[in-house]
Amino acid sequence: MTARRTPFVNLEPGEDAAAVRVAIDRVLARGWFILGPEVAAFEMQFAAACGAPHAIGVGNGTDALALVLRAIGIGPGDEVITSPLSAAFTALAIAMVGARPVFADIDPDRLTLDPAAAAAAITPRTAGIMPVHLYGQAADMSAFVQIAQRHGLALIEDCCQAHLATCAGRPVGTFGVAGAFSFYPTKNLGALGDGGAIVTLDAALADRLRRLRNGGMATRDEHLEAGVNSRLDELQAAVLCARLPLLRGWTTRRRAIAAIYRAGLADAPVLVPPECDAGHVYHLFPIRSTERVALRAHLAAQGIDTLIHYATPIPRQPAFAATDPADCPIAARVCGEVLSLPLYPALGNDDTASVVAAVSSFPARRDAGVAR
Ligand SMILES: *Cc1c(COP(=O)(O)O)cnc(C)c1O
């Protein structure tokens, strides 16, 4: 037992505090709050960080996904295949454009959408596939690129948990038509509120997205199409510009913590999902146990906060129950077993040591962690 408390996340500015303050003051002094120089600068810098020629700042990650779908003409009557194990916002973005989310099961090791299951779910109505780079690890994109090409489908990447992640060395967001990012405060790159961005290699798509996010305006006086209001604002863009240069270092620290957990928990009575790609950026670090309730209570008693990502497969959420009767047994099982440990750059080595000690001292039944 120990008296120290390890919170699940810590959003207080740290090494970025001075730069964030300067950025906020700069925007206040300029008095320009929507679609100004900060958004333009952030779009250029974020695109470069993602290895893409274009980035478009938008209101949040959900809108980023929905705007891509809309911009490529996916809507009512269309189906988009996606993962049952994700934030429900992934599927909400599909529903927002009037299309139907279709859920295919996940790969039991990677925990991302299984390419074979996705291929088996293709129907004449399928218009796209939306893999989610979950917990910071890319989906198996070489397989999805092949499937999309073979069937003439659009690939839309949910990169909301995967800033700077790569798949076999190539940046996420550059495999399909576009990648959607969120800057929700807890993400690897977070704003002081909502924010999002789309990256794409396609200049014409980038222009269309810039118009759609701003009411469909082509010029000050002309609404070319009925767009939406989903703009990244100047204050958030300035904060993101201040933080982006620190993101590589933060990612390195996340990977170091993950390595400490992997080494420390190798013999613990839990299952640690394997690292399937070295480009993993460890947005989250879920472990698995068939005795999750007891494990969570055991950790809480030692001051360690945990969260569940995610407790329910999206097709089992009331909001989607009528949409798809899909049975995704692997996702259902994983939802019953995952427990995310604290993992963020400010977490110190004494914190990680107490997490390892607490998980290791869990008096599990012998088979609790080995179930697959
Ligand atoms: C956070 C998140 C979203 C939604 O992003 P918002 O900015 O909150 O709209 C979508 N998909 C995944 C996988 C996420 O983690």
Image (cartoon, rainbow, N blue to C red):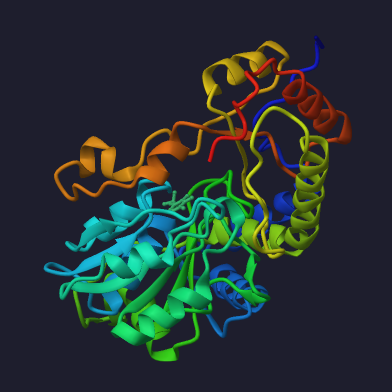
Tell me which residue sits at (65%, 14%) in the image: 298
- The answer to which of 314 and 222 lies nearer the viewer is 314
Tell me which residue sits at (59%, 26%) in the image: 368
- The answer to which of 281 and 223 lies nearer the viewer is 281
Q: Is 37 displayed left or right of 114 in the figure? A: right
Residue 189, quarter of the rendered image: bottom right
Is residue 46 positioned above or below 310 on the image?
Answer: below
Residue sitting farthest toward the front: 366
Tell me which residue sits at (69%, 65%) in the image: 279
Is residue 204 positioned above or below 185 on the image?
Answer: below
Numbered-mark total: 0
Is residue 290 positioned above or below 300 on the image?
Answer: below
Picture coordinates of residue 356 (x, y %)?
Answer: 79, 29
Residue 122, quarter of the rendered image: bottom left
Picture coordinates of residue 63 (x, y %)?
Answer: 36, 60
For the N terminus, give its image quadrant: top right
Picture coordinates of residue 53 (x, y %)?
Answer: 56, 85
Is residue 19 positioned above or below 264 on the image?
Answer: below
Q: Is 284 displayed left or right of 260 in the figure? A: left
Task: Residue 60: tell me if it is visible.
Answer: no
Task: Residue 94: tell me if it is visible.
Answer: yes
Picture coordinates of residue 121 (x, y %)?
Answer: 26, 65
Residue sitting farthest toward the left: 77
Tell me which residue sits at (37%, 86%) in the image: 149
